């Protein structure tokens, strides 16, 4: 393990000079656009937002699964955070302008390299975006020496970030078998279960994927289970147009996916509150990394209990959207959306009610859709709260200097 700055002592020493506290309440200067709409160049407050917007476009083109998309955004924003901290630290520690590395150069180089590692088939488009970023830098008068020095800083950061990603166990091969029996989830015909090894991926904040493993769910066909199943059957039988619309909105199985949705919500808030690049990078990194950890914990629990989906238990339940090919308990949406919303609520206190509203609607949408029992959502939200609390505590201990594993 190594930290963004070489030692905790040094991090604490400069923390008061570099503004990193996401929990400080910033002041909005503009109304945010509706989540899901595109940012225009005039709305961008930093290169951080521009590169995150570009990353979301790669998700649309490359069509990764939900977890791949979230993992890519987590490592991207972590590298960006380190880039702005590293360059800000250089400025604080030198009186000679000739030795200062450009922040834009560091962000551009780090972002491009990490995105190539995450989306290798999109490398030509990423290189084109990097060249465009370099051109924009030249247009605003960025000194070439400074910019190239920043690019070297960014390249070094990217190399460390990519090395960490390669060693995180995400690509571990599963050699197990799906268990069988009453109340046990079963895979779609001819399809392997989705990421049964994700729970063993190295997390960013947790010590391991099982740190917040959910408690045993209601036993199949127990009174509590039958009540939970009956509720989802009732939604299926009487689904209103509004409920159907909510279920379909939060499905997010295409486009930028759930990870991209929350990334854009965060980017909108960064713009609305006009955060500087250091704080912008910090908010995005903390949110994406926490959401990734929550997803890891969620899959650890899923493949511990292998709980059957409601529509598998009762074939008369008709899902409003496609059925994900992994066990029911707990809800991935509750884990991911819950973690993302909680981090944003902490970063932007004035937005807390709206973040909580979206979080709860996302979770409720899965009941309307016929995909999850209510105990799935409850367990997922508990995981989200536990992981978010841990991440915020660790972040405050490090004064906002997030670590690369």
Image: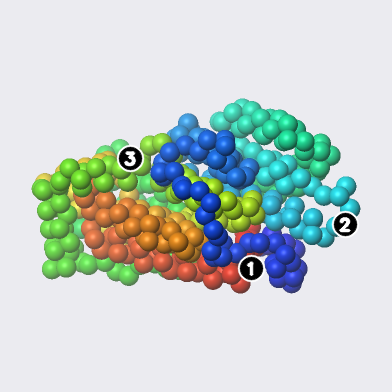
The percent position of residue 359, horizontal first and vertical second, equals 35, 57
* Residue hosting label 1: 399
In the picture, measured across the screen, residue 87 lies left or right of residue 257, that is right
* Image quarter of residue 16: bottom right
Q: Is residue 366 left or right of residue 89?
A: left
What percent of the width, then of the height, locates residue 141?
Answer: 77, 36
Left or right of 159, for residue 293: left
Residue at horizontal 70 percent and vertical 62 percent from the top:
18
The part of the image, by quadrant, that contains residue 50 is top right
Q: Is residue 270 visible?
A: no
Residue occupying image coordinates x 56% and y 31%: 122
Q: Nearer the viewer, residue 225 or 149?
A: 149
Disc 3, SS: loop
Q: Quadrant of residue 45?
A: top right
Q: For this rendering, which residue is in front, 249 or 70?
A: 249
Residue 380's tag is none
Query: Is 388 located above or below residue 65 in the figure?
Result: below
What distance separates the C-alpha of mark 2 from that of mark 3? Answer: 60 Å
| Left or right placement of residue 21 versus residue 238 in this view | right
Q: Check contact, mark 3 vs mark 1: CB within 8 A.
A: no
Asked whether disc 2 touches disc 1, contact meaning CB atoms under 8 Å apart, the reply is no
The residue carrying pointer 1 sits among few (fewer than 14), some (14 to 19) or many (20 or more) residues within 10 Å by Cα, namely many
The residue at which mark 2 appears reads as 95
Indicate the secondary structure of the residue bearing disc 2.
loop
Give x and y (percent) for residue 10.
Answer: 75, 68
Name the residue carrying label 3: 191
Q: Nearer the viewer, mark 3 or mark 1?
A: 1
- Dot 1 falls on a residue whose secondary structure is loop
Q: Is residue 276 visible?
A: yes
Which mark's residue is nearer the viewer, 2 or 1? 2
Q: Neighbour class for label 2 at 10 Å: few (<14), some, many (≥20)?
A: few
């Amino acid at each position: 393990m190594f930290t963004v700055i070489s030692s905790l002592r040094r991090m604490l020493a400069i923390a008061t000079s570099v503004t990193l506290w996401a929990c400080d309440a910033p002041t909005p200067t503009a109304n945010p656009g509706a989540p899901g709409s595109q940012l225009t160049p005039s709305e961008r407050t930093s290169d951080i937002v521009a590169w995150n917007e570009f990353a979301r476009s790669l998700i649309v083109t490359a069509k990764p699964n939900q977890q791949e998309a979230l993992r890519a955004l987590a490592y991207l924003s972590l590298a960006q955070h380190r880039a702005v901290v590293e360059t800000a630290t250089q400025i604080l520690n030198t009186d000679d302008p000739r030795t200062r590395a450009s922040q834009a150069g560091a962000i551009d180089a780090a972002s491009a390299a990490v995105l190539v590692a995450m989306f290798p088939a999109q490398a030509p488009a990423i290189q084109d975006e990097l060249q465009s970023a370099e051109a924009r830098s030249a247009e605003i008068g960025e000194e070439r020496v400074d910019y190239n020095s920043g690019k070297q800083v960014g390249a070094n950061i990217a190399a460390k970030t990519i090395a960490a990603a390669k060693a995180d166990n995400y690509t571990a091969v599963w050699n197990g078998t799906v268990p069988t029996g009453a109340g046990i989830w079963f895979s779609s015909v001819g399809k392997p279960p989705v990421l049964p090894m994700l729970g063993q991926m190295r997390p960013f904040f947790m010590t391991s994927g099982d740190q917040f493993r959910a408690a045993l769910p209601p036993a199949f066909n127990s009174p509590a289970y039958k009540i939970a199943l009956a509720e989802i059957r009732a939604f299926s039988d009487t689904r209103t147009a509004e409920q159907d619309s909510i279920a379909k909105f939060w499905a997010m199985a295409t486009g930028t996916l759930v990870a991209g949705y929350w990334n854009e919500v965060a980017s909108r808030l960064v713009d609305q509150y006009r955060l500087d690049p250091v704080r912008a990078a910090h908010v995005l990194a903390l949110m994406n990394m926490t959401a990734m950890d929550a997803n890891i914990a969620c899959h650890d629990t899923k493949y511990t209990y292998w709980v059957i989906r409601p529509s598998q238990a009762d074939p008369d339940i008709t899902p409003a959207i496609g059925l994900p090919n992994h066990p029911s308990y707990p809800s991935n949406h509750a884990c991911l959306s819950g973690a993302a919303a909680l981090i944003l609520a902490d970063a932007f206190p004035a937005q807390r009610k709206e973040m909580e509203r979206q979080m709860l609607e996302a979770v409720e949408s899965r009941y309307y859709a016929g995909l999850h029992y209510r105990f799935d959502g409850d367990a997922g939200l508990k995981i989200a709260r536990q992981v978010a609390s841990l991440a915020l505590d660790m972040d405050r201990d490090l004064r906002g200097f997030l670590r690369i594993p």
